[in-house]
Image (tube, rainbow, N blue to C red):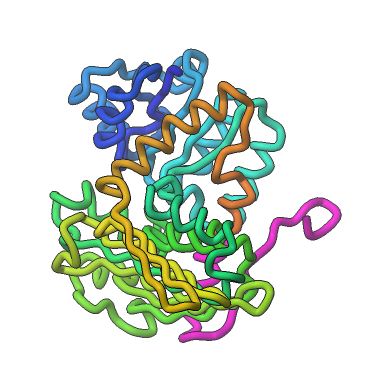
Amino acid sequence: MRILIASGVRHARDYVPLLRSLPGIEVIGCADTADSPFAEDSAALAGATDIPLLDLDEGLASCDIALVCSEPTRHVDLAVRALEADRHVLVDKPAATDTRGAQRLWDAADRSRGLLSAVHRLHSPQIARARRIVDSGAIGLPLAVDAEWLAAGGLDGATVERPELVCDPALSGGGELMNFGWYPALAIRHLTGLEVEEVVAFSSAAPRTPLFGGPHGTYGVEDAAVLSLRLGNGAVATATVARTPAGIGPAPVSSTLRVLGSHGHVLADEDAPSVAVRGADGVSASRQIGGPAGVTALRLLFTEFCDDIRYGRTPLVTAADIHAAVAVVEAALSSARGDGVPVAPAVRTTATGVA
């Protein structure tokens, strides 16, 4: 598969060597639009990784997959352009910064011959095993989910290429809720199969203040947020996202997901990494799973998406999943700005009404 990096602004420097290590994948170059505010970043990526710097139309004409790695607020424009060229598209997270953009992606994917998916961690061995346990019925019906996503190391150059790509709403769409809320929103939907009906959220942004100041305080965005979600079938969920000044575990990001069921619970710990399950009989079992969750999940994401294309399969994360996750984050931001007012996530609309 020939992969084009569509704008080399965020994460592409990590993705290129990983892609090159996978069989059957060729990174053909990096391309950006002429009016890109970060055109020099794409040029720097091309120089640092020894790949051609291409015109965007030239690159799209030569690739099988466009991997969109621009600043988040430009993800949708680049992804739609690639879909309109009938390319397969992977969009870096978050795939869109609001539901209007997520709907544009969905509509473009419906018209395109290309497949659409986005960067996620649902292929991590921990989440994959937890999903199998839930699907097996071992813990009964899912009743509640608790998710935690904590990033370490602040916003220095070793952890984030440019702090403004996380903190400046004009580039990022928000703060850490926009940056990381995508992951637990996708995981909760993936593990339960339930839609979020209502969101209540509190964050460290206005009308509050960031916990640790710095760039978050400068731009007035949150570095921490807590979400309470009402799901279908009477289930509930909570999610905590935050950037902390010190690490919780050995990895840059610490993530745990616990699903409470009617007959037991399962805990997926991506930091350990392990999965533990406890049944109604009180018997517990824990198993070490895989290696570093982030790298393993990305390797599987890229290889599985290529196989989705080869074999005509539906990607694990679809346009519908993208829209649902973006809608939860959008509702959480709205709720937090209202100091905890309940907000229903937006649903996709069509010319004749709700889809």
Residue 49: percent from left, percent from top: 21, 23
Quadrant where the N terminus sits is top left
Taking depth in this image into account, of 44 and 199 the one nearest to the observer is 199
Residue 26: percent from left, percent from top: 37, 17
In the figure, 10 relative to 220: above or below? Answer: above
Task: Give the residue at x 58% y 57%.
Answer: 135
Magenta-drawn stretch contains 221: no
Residue 33 shows up from this direction: yes
Residue 318 horizontal side relative to residue 294, left or right: right
In the figure, 44 relative to 176: above or below? Answer: above
Task: Give the residue at x 14% y 67%.
Answer: 246
Residue 55: percent from left, percent from top: 41, 19
Residue 318 horizontal side relative to residue 259, left or right: right
Task: Give the residue at x 64% y 50%.
Answer: 320
Quadrant where the C terminus sits is bottom right
In the figure, 68 relative to 280: above or below? Answer: above
Magenta stretch in the rendered image: 326-355
Residue 151 horizontal side relative to residue 130, left or right: left
